[in-house]
Image (cartoon, coloured by chain):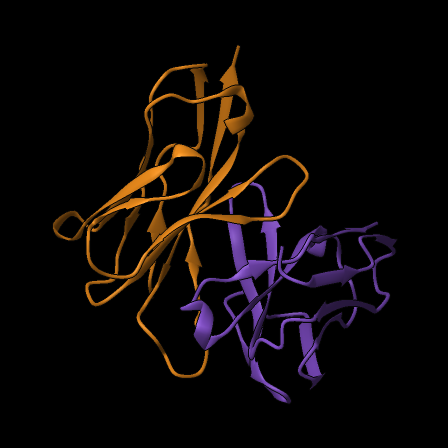
Chain colours: A orange, B purple
C-alpha cells in the first residue's frame, strides 16, 4: 500500500526564515501530489498540486514545491515565512486514476510554528 | 470555498450509543469521502463513495458504516460509539473535473465519553 512520510513533525521558525518541509512517498508509478494546509481550528485547504510537466510547482501565498521523481520526494518550500503561516501542513499522494475513486494517502502532517 | 457543510459541528455522546454525522454538498461532485483526524496520524480514510449507493471501505472502517442515497448527502454512522472514536471527522468531495483534488468540509468534533 502507498505510504507518505513527513519526517518533520514540528518545526519552529522565526519570521523571515526560509522553510523546507519534507515529503516522501512509496509508490513507484504515476502519482499526483498535493500539499494541503490546515490553519488552527479550520479545515484543510489546497496549497499546491503537481500532476505533470514542470516539476517545480508554485502555489498560493508564496509556497512552492519540487517533485523529484528519482527521490520519490515532493518537498514544500517558502523563502520567507510569516507569522500567519503558522499551521499544520499535509502532503498527500494519489496513485494515478483508479476509476472508482480518487483516493488520497496523507502524511501525518508537520506542525509549523512561526515566532515573531 | 466549495459548498460543503457538516452537521453537527460538535457532538458529545456516551459509549454504546449510535451516532450519525452528515455531509452535504452543493457542488454535484461524484466522489465523497469520510476521514478522521487524530494527532500523530494525520488524516485516515474511513469510507468513500463513488456514486449514489456506491460505497467502499477505507483503511479504518471498523465500527463505521456509510450511506449515500442522494448525490449531495453522505452519512457516516458509528453503530455503537466507543472512546477510541473520539476524533475530528472531515468530509471531502472530488470529481473528474477537479483532477483528483479533494475539497474539505469544516469538520465535526466528536467526543465519546
Q: Position of residue B77 (x, y in %)?
A: 75, 72
Can residue B55 be seen here?
Answer: no
Please say if B105 is above or below A67. below
- The residue at 19%/63% (across/down) is A28
| Quadrant in the rendering for residue A26 | bottom left
**Viewer-closest of B25 and B78:** B25
Q: Decide which of B61, A93 is in the foreground and name it.
A: A93
Residue B86 visible in image: yes
Can you give x and y, in whole percent of width and height, for residue B4 in the image? 68, 63
Query: Residue A19 sits in which quadrant?
Result: top left
Is A19 rendered above or below residue A93? above
Residue located 56% across and 48% down the image: A44
In this rendering, the count of numbered labels is 0
The N terminus of chain A lies in which quarter of the figure?
bottom left
Residue located 74% across and 61% down the image: B5
Write the residue at 33% across / 21% down.
A18
Amino acid at each position: 500500500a502507498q505510504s507518505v512520510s513527513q519526517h518533520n513533525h514540528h518545526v519552529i521558525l522565526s519570521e523571515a526564515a526560509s522553510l523546507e518541509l519534507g515529503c516522501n512517498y512509496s509508490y513507484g508509478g504515476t502519482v499526483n501530489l498535493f500539499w494541503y494546509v490546515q490553519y488552527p481550528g479550520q479545515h484543510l485547504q489546497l496549497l499546491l498540486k503537481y500532476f505533470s510537466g514542470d516539476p517545480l510547482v508554485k502555489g498560493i501565498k508564496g509556497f512552492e514545491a519540487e517533485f523529484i521523481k528519482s527521490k520519490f520526494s515532493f518537498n514544500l518550500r517558502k523563502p520567507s515565512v510569516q507569522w500567519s503561516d503558522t499551521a499544520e501542513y499535509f502532503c498527500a499522494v494519489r496513485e494515478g486514476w483508479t476509476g472508482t475513486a480518487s483516493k488520497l494517502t496523507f502524511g501525518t502532517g508537520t506542525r509549523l510554528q512561526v515566532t515573531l | 470555498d466549495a459548498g460543503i457543510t457538516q452537521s453537527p459541528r460538535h457532538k458529545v455522546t456516551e459509549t454504546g450509543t449510535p451516532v450519525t454525522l452528515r455531509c452535504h454538498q452543493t457542488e454535484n461532485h461524484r466522489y465523497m469521502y469520510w476521514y478522521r483526524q487524530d494527532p500523530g496520524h494525520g488524516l485516515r480514510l474511513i469510507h468513500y463513495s463513488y456514486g449514489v449507493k456506491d460505497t467502499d471501505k477505507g483503511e479504518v472502517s471498523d465500527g463505521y458504516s456509510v450511506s449515500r442515497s442522494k448525490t449531495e448527502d453522505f452519512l457516516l454512522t458509528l453503530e455503537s460509539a466507543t472512546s477510541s472514536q473520539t476524533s475530528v471527522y472531515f468530509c471531502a468531495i472530488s470529481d473528474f473535473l477537479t483532477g483528483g483534488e479533494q475539497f474539505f468540509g469544516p469538520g465535526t468534533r466528536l467526543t465519546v465519553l
